[in-house]
Image (cartoon, rainbow, N blue to C red):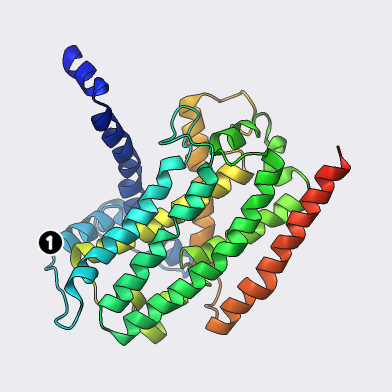
Amino acid sequence: MKEFLLNILQNETLVYTLMAIIPLIWVIPFALFAVWWERKISAHMQDRLGPMRTGWHGSVQTIADILKLILKEDIVPTAADSTLFKLAPYIVFGGAYAAYAVIPFSAAFTGSEINIGLFYFISISSVVVVGLLMAGWASNNKFSLYGALRSAAQIVSYEIPVALALLTVVMVAGTFDLQAINHAQSGMFWHWFVFQKFPFLFFALIIYFTASLAEVNRTPFDIPEAESELVGGYHTEYSGMRFALLFLSEYSNMFAVSAIATTLFFGGWNSPFGDVLGGPWWGAFWFLTKGMTFIFVQMWLRWTLPRLRVDQLMYVGWKVLIPFSFVLIVGVGVWMLAVR
């Protein structure tokens, strides 16, 4: 057995494959839990109970749902572009999943600790737009095409304030390396960047989180999937496992943007109490706890805020978030020059 394990570790390709699979062990259970969690949160906010029959308080309901989706017939519309229609969900999920390569879950685990980790994250997450456009166009459905075009315009527009808001942290940390940014926030919680250069980095967090809601099509920016207008948007024609992949991608993106907010503004895997309750395992605990807190806020907002119109969405992105992002960059730059 020992020799077998040594042979595996010596096989570089196999080791990299296993490392690539590790985030999937988190993404799938998280998506199943998050769907159930969102149902329960929405139910309690509306004075309902939500799923109750399958498992304790409906805890097994999402497992039953995913089994149903796996067993459903894989339907491809007659007029659809079959090749692109089938390929689109894999591109969407691939773009979402590839972003996990640089997310530092703890001091001991990062898929790829590269010195341009943040730049890679922003770049690779943009691949999702290609898959969404492909899904909408290949479906040969006007509602799907409208949803895809809305999604592309929305994501491309809001990538700008996301990148500008994150650039303020890069200016303070002096690096794109996500692990290095974590180390720069070690110590007690007041060393976290959200409390540094106040109020510039605090407002950068607000801008990033707002724009990230648009990036992952969450309320109040969920107009690409507006049920009252577009049935289901870009995924209207999808069913079975392909629909499940699109659904999984959405929840994967939700955690990915929350993980970046945790890493850049809230100390990442650092304990809020300094060296107390630190270490690799505790680091993963703190990281996931902070990330899940952001997920809860995203779900909370979904059942609190109304959906914006298309023109309102573009106004917020181009005339509010982007100008304020530039103000924050200038403010942080002036502060850093003044304290030298």
Identify the residue at image location x=66%, y=67%. 321
Residue 194 % position (x, y): 69, 46
Q: Nearer the viewer, residue 287 or 135?
A: 135
In the rendered view, tell whether residue 255 sits above or below residue 154. Answer: above
Q: Nearer the viewer, residue 48 or 138?
A: 138
Q: Nearer the viewer, residue 270 or 242?
A: 242
Identify the residue at image location x=53%, y=48%. 119
Q: Quadrant of the N terminus?
A: top left
The reply to whether residue 231 is visible in this rendering is no
Q: Nearer the viewer, residue 131 or 44?
A: 131
Identify the residue at image location x=47%, y=70%. 46
The reply to whether residue 6 is visible in this rendering is yes
**Snapshot quadrant of residue 242:** bottom left
In the rendered view, tell whether residue 73 sits above or below residue 35. Answer: below
**Label 1 neighbour load within 10 Å: few <14, some 14-19, many 20+:** few
Which residue is the extreme one toward the right? 338
Label 1 sits on what residue type? Answer: Leu
Number of numbered callouts drawn? 1
Q: Which residue is mark 1?
A: 71
